[in-house]
Image (cartoon, rainbow, N blue to C red):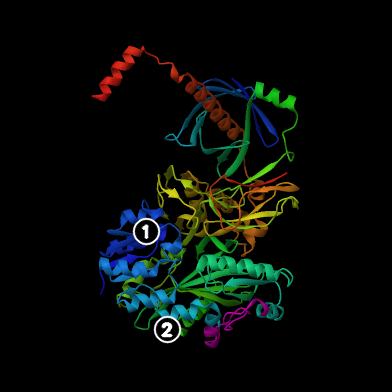
Amino acid sequence: MFNKVLIANRGEIAVRIIRACRELGMQTVAVFSEADRQALHVRYADEAYLLGPAPSRESYLRGDKIIGIALKSGAKAIHPGYGFLAERADFSQACQDAGLAYIGPKPSSIAAMGDKAVARATVAKAGVPVVPGTEGEGSLHDDELLAVAATIGFPLLVKATAGGGGKGMREVHNLEEMPALLRSARREAEASFGDGNVYLEKLVEGARHIEFQILADTHGNVIHLGERECSLQRRHQKLLEESPSPFIGDDEDMRQRMGSVAVRSAQAVGYVNAGTIEFLVDKDRNFYFLEMNTRLQVEHPVTEMVTGVDIVKEQIRIARGRQLRSTQENIHMNGWAIECRINAEDPYDSFIPSTGRITHSLLPTGPGVRVDTGIYPGFEISPYYDSLISKLIVWGETRAEAILRMRRALEEYKIVGVRTNIPFHQNMMDSHRFMGGQFDTRFVEERFSMEAAEEGKTTRPEIAAIIATLVAHQQTQRAAHIIQRGERDTSNWKWLGRWERLQR
Amino acid sequence: MKYVTTIGEREYIIEIDDERHILLDGVPYEVDFDSVSGQPVYSLLLDGQSYESYVYSGEEGLQVLLHGTLYPAVVEDEREKRLRAAAGARVAERGEYYLKAPMPGMIVAVLVNEGQTVDKGDVLVVLESMKMQNELKSPKPGTVGRVRVKSGDSVEQKQTLLSVV
């Protein structure tokens, strides 16, 4: 049984895990790269150790060093968070070999679900529907993929075998453009995961992305915590999630059918700990298994808000060999939760990443608001890691209340120093299609633009004009002031006297 | 002090009498304007109405982010306005364009060679930052001038990568 946990991650998720450990009375060990000496997870943990230089490959991906630090510090368990070493069977195995508890699934489950081709073959055998693709065929060469593409049909997706988060993913519309897209997908997959293997999958059009959170303990209990709607994505990166899904709504029958398929998928690989089954749902409400994420998800808070279950604490309890605290009958979804991912990206300049020092940050607070973040004023956003800097989550009794609460929270949230996508979320909250729940995975890219969103909205250009003029006026005045600075307002003798007094 | 401030197509005449009083297109308003703890976040009380906004300085003027809407603004005093009118339209797609790195990162690929002709919108360079590959495109048609980077190079923000003549 462990009482000290090493968190093999950074940013908001490392902070989230440290909080869960603290509330359970556990000691925490942070690891950090040279770029993260000032990071919040280093400041919040009981102990912190340097891993190496800023690039992930030399720091957060160094499983060997991390295990070494765990052994040296006496941490008996490792929580991988998401990204980096999460979903790496070899790392989970190495922890086990070193006598450390891995707060996550067994290596065999990660391996089975981690190679998405094997995953699809496994769940298909358990009677779970899957999307057509190069399932169960291992790592194919470009010429083999090109040959099989025609049988799947276009449009299709090239996806990274080791991937997630849209990295190494490309959409292909015809055979001619496929070789070039395969090359860039492999290049990006290699850079992100150290594994350039890819597979193909039919693109379901008009699809919604709905996922189910599951929890499984070592005593054979598996439950689901309902669904999350994750259809709002850009370049296959999720931007906003909510629970429940407005598409499933009060179709309790569909929810239970999908939930039991999710539970069956997890059981097919003997799954233990927290995991997520992702489904694609077409407009006729058919659902297909997409993949299983064998880790804690970025968007887990929306499920926590509606079910009241602390998923990270539950993960730790499961890893300590405890039984689940809830049975399926005890799980009820109460109200509605929405999460906006706040990224350091400029929504007015094709979402280009923005780096720099956070000079000011004012967090939204008040009823029903939660912020999970790893940044604070003075912290430097570096180009080495992904652009997620904060997650803003709200709860409301109804979806409408949650949207209105999110609007006011977004207006309150001030982050200065880098550009953020907060205005994107503000426009999304004002979008009639979003309010009506009428969106699919293509909505952000194909039918939503910052300019169009602002049409018909009450704008106040005259107020903006006044503010711009007052700022420009102040700047001119200050510039005039700086030029005059050489002229001291008192005599040089007086000035010298003050100077000398300062030096005493 | 009298300013002409342009937002989109619309021009506003704004006169600043003193710290507390302005005229917007001839209509007087009482103002109380201050930055929030020295940050580029400003609080404006305009006849008691409260507004808060971010103001960014860009190469082409100021950008005001108010209630989730971004307003690019050009503020000129009367002298500047007259000078610009005399010089004619702003330099648009004429002249040399220098492609600068919009953020620090690593060059993944340089897709053009010196002397190559490019169209507006053609991808010039692929830059990786924050694990995302970003395609940097040509804003104008022209010929590629000197290419100053190669793939694998780490670049700083605003570093010049190449030019399009």
- In terms of secondary structure, where does tag 1 sit? strand
Badge 2 or badge 1: first in the primary sequence: 1
Report which residue position mark 2 lands on.
A270
**Drawn side of residue A177 relative to residue A495, left or right:** right
Could you tell me the amino acid type at mark 2?
A: Gly
Considering the image in quadrants, where does the C terminus of chain A appear?
Answer: top left
Q: CA distance from mark 2 to mark 1?
A: 33 Å
Q: State whether the magenta stretch is mostly helix, strand or loop.
A: loop
Considering the image in quadrants, where does the N terminus of chain A appear?
Answer: bottom left
Q: Which residues are magenta?
A: A121-143
Q: Percent x, y for residue B115?
A: 74, 50
The subunit letter for the residue under badge 2 reads A
Could you tell me the amino acid type at mark 1?
A: Phe
A437 relative to A37, above or below: below
A193 relative to A374, above or below: below
Q: Percent x, y for residue A30?
A: 33, 61
Report which residue position mark 1 lands on.
A32
A267 relative to A380, above or below: below
**Drawn side of residue B109 relative to residue B165, left or right:** left
Residue A37 shows up from this direction: yes
**Drawn side of residue A201 relative to residue B54, left or right:** right
**Drawn side of residue A320 relative to residue A390, left or right:** left
